[in-house]
Image (cartoon, rainbow, N blue to C red):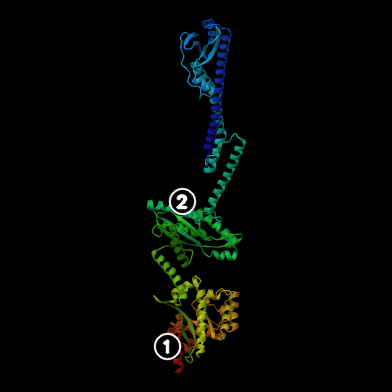
Amino acid sequence: MIFTIQRFVLTLILVVIFILSSIFIYYFKNQVENTSKVIFTTMENEVKEKAYTISKTIEKKDDILLYMALLGNVAANSQFVKAILVFDDNELLLTTDPKVVSIERNSSLTNIKTYSEKLSEISYIQEDINYYEQNRLKKLDLVFLIDKEYINTYFVKNRYEFFVYFGILPIFLVLIMYYIFRKYITIPLEKLRQLAYYNTKIPKAFKIKELESIRHSMVDSFSRLENEKKEFFLMARTDSLSGLANRNSLQEFLDRLIPTAKRKKVEFAFLFLDLDHFKTINDSLGHNIGDELLQKISTILKQVLRPNDFIARVGGDEFVLIIQDYKTTVELTNIIKRIQKQLAKPWVIQTHPVETTCSVGIAIFPQDGEDHVSLMKSADIAMYEAKKHGRNRYHFFTKDLNEAILKVINLNKEMRTALKNGDYKLFYQPKVCLKDSKIIGVEALIRWIDKEKGFIPPSDFIPLAEENDFILELGDWIVEEALNQYLDWKSKGIDIVMSINISAKQFLQNNFAKNLIDKINSKKIEPNRIILELTEYILIDQNNSVYATLRKLNKFGISISLDDFGTGYSSLSYLKKYPIDYLKIDKSFIDDSFNEQGKVFIETIVKMGQALHMKIVAEGVEQQEQVEYLKSIDCNLYQGYYFSKPIKAKEFEEFYKSLEKN
């Protein structure tokens, strides 16, 4: 059983009182017995003495009257004797009190053991007076009648005095001790307990040194704990780098704001702000520059926003702004424009000039989300839409936008599942020599044939695959499948060049060239039977790693074809610098081959390629007139629906063999 301090002290006091009471009762009874013994033995000795004295001097019964004065004096001087009587059997011979002429006989004294019981049970003490009359022994009864009323009064008085001195006084002293103990020990300990438990009201200084030392230590500890708790509270809700609120603080703010907005039926704007090209700043100048830039941007944001607005840093370069109390959408957009204008100003960070902009996604409560998660999701979607449209913009979330994003999310999941389920197929479009109309190679083109949705165009999933890096896994599958198909055809006597499209991310991987060369060697394929189709985007940076990869592939014997030439960042410098074997004229130029201006562009590309010792491939050829024109300008190869659309491997095999027979 666990006691409180109060209960423990009370229990201790009760135990002390019980012990003192037991001692008091014991000593009181002992005192009563001792007093009773003194009274009883005194009267007993007195009656014996007087009986003996009278026995020595009395000669006859009537002489007893001579002792009236003696016995009266004894009765008068003894407070405990009420009267003295002398009987001859039942005949009263003498009494010191005329009012007392008879006595009640004592009960049996057999069971009486103590003197206190004797005083309470018997009413008189009797002794025999023996004398000789004419040589005959005679006996008179000398009786001392006990004054019970006085004895009771005496004992009551004695009991009161004893109770006062040995009962009340100790209890009073105990109560004083209890008061002192309670005031200086119990109450301070209780206050210390409350301080330890509730940590609210700090008690004043105590009188007892040890308790004061404990109090001071506790107050000091709790003060430090309170300060640490406040620091931890702020740390849990404050971004350490910028000093702004963090995700936890944002959540708490919205937990208060959303119910209020619902009750008042008002809206607020949830803005998701992301810095444009911040990763480039970190990578090029260092994270210390990036961190200082974030601190300066945080300061600017706090200055630009109004006092009732809220701002939190929720990621590396991501901020959430909550704008309230705007009257119109125009006012809201003006605030956003002001923020973007301030952030777009040139910065100087540790002597480094830095320029940055921001993209902002806007979600409106409650139509774009009624809780923290949905608002964040909607604003994030809108922000990425702003980036997609050129960055340094703001974009409002819409239902159509959400549906488009959900479609992308589902597509992302489905296209990964499709690879596991074997839903991707390679189709092959022939590359035809313009001089003799013979197939000299094929271009492997990926197709997605979903079991439920059917054919899904590459334009729907390839850009997404490139964006989320799934193109790396998909690209590996394309290379493996195309090389295996080349081997299968070769075993059947169809030895043609295989062109494989390589994405920029796939090409820029570390050890891309080494891994591809190892794979071709392991399959024992002649390198000159493989062409890699690359886009101009890969060559834009013209960095050393791109050049080294191309040289390594070229030296091994793999040919490089520049796809969609003329539609991107066409530059004579990289045509001269890089080992490129084929130029592919985009379909958009071939479509313009019927007008003079279009022919000028096509002929320029052909002559430039020939001058650089490259072979020219025309894409998207669909008409006889286009074929005749390309022959006239000495174009080398073409591919397109005029000759054949992309077809399955089995269909190509049959198509190729039918042409060989003819």
- Percent x, y for residue 96? 50, 8
Q: Residue at x 54, y 33 (%)?
A: 13
**Which amino acid lies under the numbered mark 1 shown in the image of this protein?**
Glu
- Percent x, y for residue 153? 50, 17
What's the distance in space between the residues labelled 2 and 1, CA to CA? 70 Å
**Which amino acid lies under the numbered mark 2 shown in the image of this protein?**
Asn
Mark 2 surroundings within 10 Å by alpha-carbon count, few (fewer than 14), some (14 through 19), many (20 or more): few
Residue 628 in view here: no
Which residue position holds label 1?
A: 625
Q: Nearer the viewer, residue 260 or 544?
A: 260
Q: Nearer the viewer, residue 346 or 564?
A: 564
Quarter of the image for residue 328 reads bottom left
- Percent x, y for residue 53? 58, 10
Which residue position holds label 2?
A: 308
In the orientation shown, which residue stands out farthest toward the front? 135
Residue 290's place in the image compared with 112, above or below, is below
Residue 336's place in the image compared with 580, above or below, is above
The mark nearer the N terminus, 2 or 1, is 2
Of circles 2 and 1, the one toward us is 2
Q: Nearer the viewer, residue 234 or 135?
A: 135
Residue at disc 2, secondary structure: loop
